[in-house]
Image: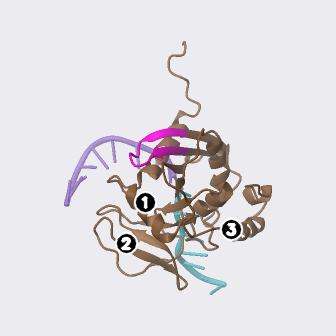
Chain colours: A brown, B cyan, C purple
Amino acid sequence: MDLPPDWIDPPDLATARAAQVALAARVVTEDALGPVRLIGGVDISNTRFDPENLVFAAVVLLAWPGLEVVASASAVRRATMPYIPGFLGFREVPALLEAWAKLGERPDLVLVDGHGVAHPRGLGIASHLGVVLDVPSIGVAKSPLVGRPEGELGAEPGEAVSLAWKGRTLGTVLRTRRRSNPLYISPGHRVSPATAVEWVQRCGTGYRLPEPTRQAHLAANVARRAHGVAKPGAPE
DNA sequence: GCGACAG
DNA sequence: ATCTTGTCGC
């Protein structure tokens, strides 16, 4: 998908906001995906107090239904924008695209660490990445951005309530593990609300996070800690 | 105008 | 997001 550079790296917040509105118009919240054989997971890692503002991106590929990691790629990039709630995509998507380009094959579905359409303008990072890459995506966030749970959420894994905002149902609040805070699931792109939750549950392996996102998180940290470290076996 | 506010 | 080991609880 060919898009204006300003939609990926906007010069200011006003442009960023306009880009979100334009990109959000392209988001599809109905199932438009083929058979799933490869599932992707993406995440970002940052260094605390980093004056360089480096962003470490990781993309991992897992086989379905085994959920084994079959490939992964990472990229380092300087952040153009600070973290501003509602504008996460502009900070993380560029690095993710760079890592994505290094992969030999593309997944049939991608789980992203962050919201999908459960966003003020309907363009959380999962939808943002999904539209830019034109790939089916799902938003898997660890805390709410907009909306409130529709009722009380049960304590058992698998229990869920809808995430409502301004009279609309944007996604699902899902308990994936006992005594763990719930996850906020919403369609990213080319996936329906129901299908989004189904895949997150299918990718559950007993941890709070579904395997694709969990592995991506680990991979992003590995990339960050390996940055600037001498290779083992090198002469003294 | 005052809070809320993904990672 | 990140800082950090052990420790308490299921």
Residue at x 49% of width, y 72% of height: A171
x then y, percent, for residue A92: 63, 53
Task: Determine the image quadrant of residue A162.
Answer: bottom left
Q: Which of the chains bears the disc numbered 2?
A: A
Q: Is residue A208 left or right of residue A106?
A: left
Q: Is residue A190 left or right of residue A141?
A: right
Q: Nearer the viewer, residue A16 or A138?
A: A138
Packing grade of label 1 (10 A; few <14, some 14-19, many >=20) is many
Q: Amino acid at mark 3?
A: Arg
Instruction: From the image, give the main secondary structure of the stretch colored magenta.
Output: strand
Q: Earlier in the sequence, mark 2 or mark 1?
A: 2
The residues bearing labels 3 and 2 have C-alpha atoms spaced at a distance of 28 Å
Q: Quadrant of the C terminus of chain A?
A: top right
Residue at x 42% of width, y 64% of height: A198
The residues bearing labels 3 and 1 have C-alpha atoms spaced at a distance of 23 Å
Q: Amino acid at mark 1?
A: Val
Q: Which of the chains bears the disc numbered 1?
A: A
x then y, percent, for residue A166: 55, 84
Q: Magenta part of the protein: which range?
A: A59-72
Q: Nearer the viewer, residue A228 or A1?
A: A1
Packing grade of label 3 (10 A; few <14, some 14-19, many >=20) is some
Q: Secondary structure at mark 3?
A: loop
Q: Is residue A61 left or right of residue A16?
A: left
Q: Earlier in the sequence, mark 3 or mark 2?
A: 3
In this view, the residue farthest toward the top is: A235
**Circle 2 is placed at which residue position?**
A160
Tell me, yes or no, whether the highlighted magenta stretch contains residue A70.
Answer: yes
Packing grade of label 2 (10 A; few <14, some 14-19, many >=20) is many
Residue at x 46% of width, y 45% of height: A62
Q: Secondary structure at mark 1?
A: helix
The residues bearing labels 2 and 1 have C-alpha atoms spaced at a distance of 12 Å
Q: Secondary structure at mark 2?
A: strand
